Image: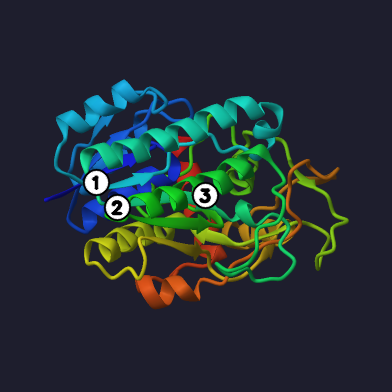
Amino acid sequence: MNKVLVTGGCGYIGSHTIVDLIDNGFEVISIDNHVNSSRKPLKGIEKITGKKIKNYKIDLCNYNRVRKVFLENKDIVGIIHFAALKAVGESSEQPLRYFQNNFNSTLNMLEAAKEFGVKNFIFSSSCTVYGNAKELPVTEETPFQRVESPYGLTKQAGEEMIEFFSKANPKINSILLRYFNPAGAHESVLLGEAPNVALNLVPIITEVAIGKRKSITVFGDDYDTRDGSNIRDYIHVMDLANAHTKALQYLMNSNNKTNCEVYNLGIGEGASVLEVIKAFEKVSGKKLKYKIGPRRKGDVVAIYSNYKKAKRRLKWKPTRNIEDIMRTAWAWEQERSK
């Protein structure tokens, strides 16, 4: 079997991607230090796939510990690097922590790929690299604007690290996947988004609906958008997971044109914060309490994707919409709250 290392494998996107990889015939090992996760997703993965996943609880910033994982697993064919601190607001409060963690972990994974001859590297990037884009939808050629947060800077810099690394190491092939806003849960309701503190809109909505929170704060209703609230491109987490599998297969089949390629992953549509709230109310039949608050530092006004390049080259396209996202997220919230 083809063995793949997933960093951040116990996290939200990482755990769903492991399921998709296994469904497509890959063997998977994980590295996750549980700073923002727990072991629970490993049990969900095992129930869904019948496969027990080995997770190494180590800090990716410690290269000696990273080396030990590779020395124990000399047959790794690909690395999918998710592990990172990722809260936009927190990154503005703790920039040095974000720089140290996200830069050093990425550097160490690249060093390991080089030392141990792992030829395929997939990087979890983000639409935050575009900043406040001047034209929508954004394509892979859209120029970067000044980022709005230290988190966004770590993604911009991470991409540039990999691009320079690729020029110096032509035998290692990399793909940079720029996601938009992942949400939703696995249909089995055995996996979903379970942050220690919910910071993203969809889990905040479901926590209000289940009674864990009193209300939602909509950060700003005076943006230059159709209803005054921020606009984002929401993509179902299982569609996103499948894109990683397809990207890895694409590299392993030598279909890449260059040894470092970039792809947007979204559904190609924007939904405002208020529209997402309405979509939840429609699929759940529940009325949500929300209030309008001030704008939040670091928030981009509006961004959504053009994913035609991924459709054309990776043979990938999203199959679920915002209502599917809200339906599975709500089913997951109800299940985990029992």
Residue depicted at 35% across the width and 61% down the height = 259
Alpha-carbon distance for marks 2 and 1?
Answer: 7 Å
Q: Which mark is residue 160?
A: 3
Question: Residue placed at 84% from the left, 58% from the top?
Answer: 223
In-front residue for pair 92/158: 158
Q: Of the residues under marks 3 and 2, which one precedes in the sequence?
A: 3
Q: Which residue is mark 1?
A: 118
In this picture, residue 153 sits left or right of residue 119: right
Which residue is the extreme one toward the right? 222
- Among numbered discs 2 and 1, the one appearing first in the sequence: 1
* Quadrant housing residue 191: top left
Residue at the left extreme, as displayed = 1
Q: Where residue 317 appears, x then y in whole percent? A: 42, 72
Crowdedness near tag 2: few (<14), some (14–19) or many (≥20) residues, C-alpha within 10 Å = many
Q: Quadrant of residue 79?
A: top left
User: What's the CA distance linking mark 3 and mark 2?
Assistant: 15 Å
Comparing 226 with 87, the one in front is: 87
Kind of element beneath mark 3: helix
| N-terminal label among 3 and 1 | 1
In the rendered view, tell whether residue 84 sits above or below residue 159. Answer: above
Task: Name the element at disc 2.
Answer: loop
Disc 3 to disc 2: CB gap under 8 Å: no
What amino acid is found at the position of numbered circle 1 in the picture?
A: Val
* Residue in view at x 37 percent, y 74 percent: 313
Q: Amino acid at mark 3?
A: Glu
Whether the residues at callouts 2 and 1 have beta carbons within 8 Å, the answer is yes
Disc 2 marks which amino acid? Ile
Q: Which residue is mark 2?
A: 172
Residue 43's tag is none
User: Neighbour class for label 3 at 10 Å: few (<14), some, many (≥20)?
Assistant: few
